[in-house]
Structure formats: structure tokens, C-alpha cells
Amino acid sequence: MLDLDATIAALSAHPERTALLVDFDGSLAPIVERAEAARPLPDAVAQLSRLAARLGCVAVVSGRPAEFLAAHLPVPGATFVGLYGMEHLVDGTRTVDARVTPYLDDVAAAVADVRTRLPDDLVELKSGVSVTLHWRPAPERADEVLAVADEVARTRGLAPLRTRMAVELRPPVAIDKGDATRALVDGFAVGAFAGDDTGDLPAFAALADAVAEGMLGAAVRIGVHSPEAPPELDGAVDVLVDGPAGLVALLARVADEIGEPQGGSPS
């Protein structure tokens, strides 16, 4: 494990050659009962904006739709990778991975199916590319939600992805945060990822593999701890911070260590 000082040194030593990737839910934004209510901590946008002005790459990599991320994290110069890597938003232009487009009609049919069986507040639509069924607002319905998800996934030929108190029905294409991470850190000397949940484990593994293969000089894997963190998190990361507040405080210290860009603070 790295201590915080070593983490800050690793992330600030070569800013222009460093790529910083960050998860959203549970990392920049506290977990909330209703998915649509999630918002980043107030200082998250300011600190990411400072870093985006100095680092070679700042990206938010999430299970959320990319347009949701961009709307709530207005960070100039940031890249937004949504739906675990199935879509990208760069400089306002959204692209969807071509491998998922053959399944979009199946996703639409799945949405119609689940809406007839579950309340709307348990169903989260994701840009027409996937749909997530939540039971956090109604924990007593967990078994029901999982049964509906399994049946609809099987009927419509989709892949269920379990996340924290939710299951996502998505195209059966092997795309995860690890793929997005490898692509984003390619060409940089230092790659970092901050995340808190099971869906972030492939990103941490991708960073370790990139170092082992000589693709990346150094990796910093930042675990964002919470009472709901998966047990595998501690062994997959180099440093742990305490919740979104701990992560934003770390980002602020890195930005302070790097200093402001020539000419003053970014607008």
C-alpha cells in the first residue's frame, strides 16, 4: 500500500504524462437511495477542473450514461466514458461502440418488458443502450427484481450485470471498465484510476497488467472505501481513501502540489 504522500508524489511528478480516471457513483458522488438523485460533491468539479488543466488526461469512467456525467461534471477538457465503456463523450461528441448497436432493439424490448412488471422508480434507462433495475429504494423487492432481470435477460438475449443493489441488462458484449482504462492510459507514463465497487475491479486489473506488460511506467490504483465496498477492493488497490470526501481531498492535494497552469487558475 502507498501512503497519501507517496500517492500525491506519483500523481504530480509528471503531470503532462499522467492520465487520471475516476468513477462517479460512490467515488465522486455519495451513494443515494434513488439513482437519478446522485450528484458529485460540491468541490469535485473544481478539483477535477484544476487537474484537467494540468494533467495529460482526465476522464470519468462510469456505468452512468456519458451525457449524465457531462451534465453533472462540467469539467473543461474531460473525457466521459459511460456505460462501462460502451459509449464515449469527447468534446461534446457522443459515440457508441459499434459492437453494441445490433442489440439496441433487444434493449428497447427489454425496457418495455420490465416497465410492465416493475414500478418506474426502480427502472433506470441508459441512453437506449442498457437498462438498470434497482432495489435500493425498495429492499424488500430484491428477489422480485432479480427474478424479473433474469427472465427478461434470458428472453431478450441480454447479459445481466450485478452491481450494488442493482442489476443492469446490457448487450452481451465483453466491454468493461478495464477496456476503457487500457485505451485511455495508452501513451502515458502514469495511469491512475479511482473507484469503489465491483465494476471498478477490471480497471484496477487493467492498470496492473499495463505496467507488467511495459505499456505503462507506473500505476496508482485508488480505492474509495465505504461500508458497502466489495471485499476484493482492498487487495486490488494501492491506496485507500475514506469515501468521496476522501477522494476529493486527495485530488485537491494533487492539484495543489502540481500548482496552477501558467497564467493563473483555469476559468
Image: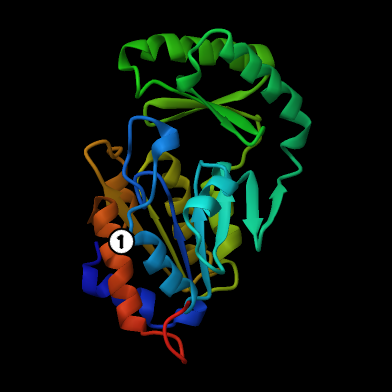
| Residue at 39% over, 41% down | 38
The quadrant holding residue 194 is bottom left
Residue 209 picture location, percent across and down: 49, 58
Q: Is residue 206 above or below residue 160?
A: below
Residue 157 picture location, percent across and down: 68, 19
Report the side of 73 relative to 186 (left or right): left
Q: How many marks?
A: 1
Residue 183 picture location, percent across and down: 61, 59
Q: Does the image show residue 13?
A: yes
Look at the image and name its color scheme. rainbow
- The residue that disc 1 covers is 248
Residue 17 or 110: which is nearer the viewer? 110
Please state which amino acid type lies under the numbered disc 1. Answer: Val
Q: Element under label 1?
A: helix
Report the side of 147 relative to 175 (left or right): left
Q: Does the image show residue 239?
A: no
Residue 80 picture location, percent across and down: 56, 55
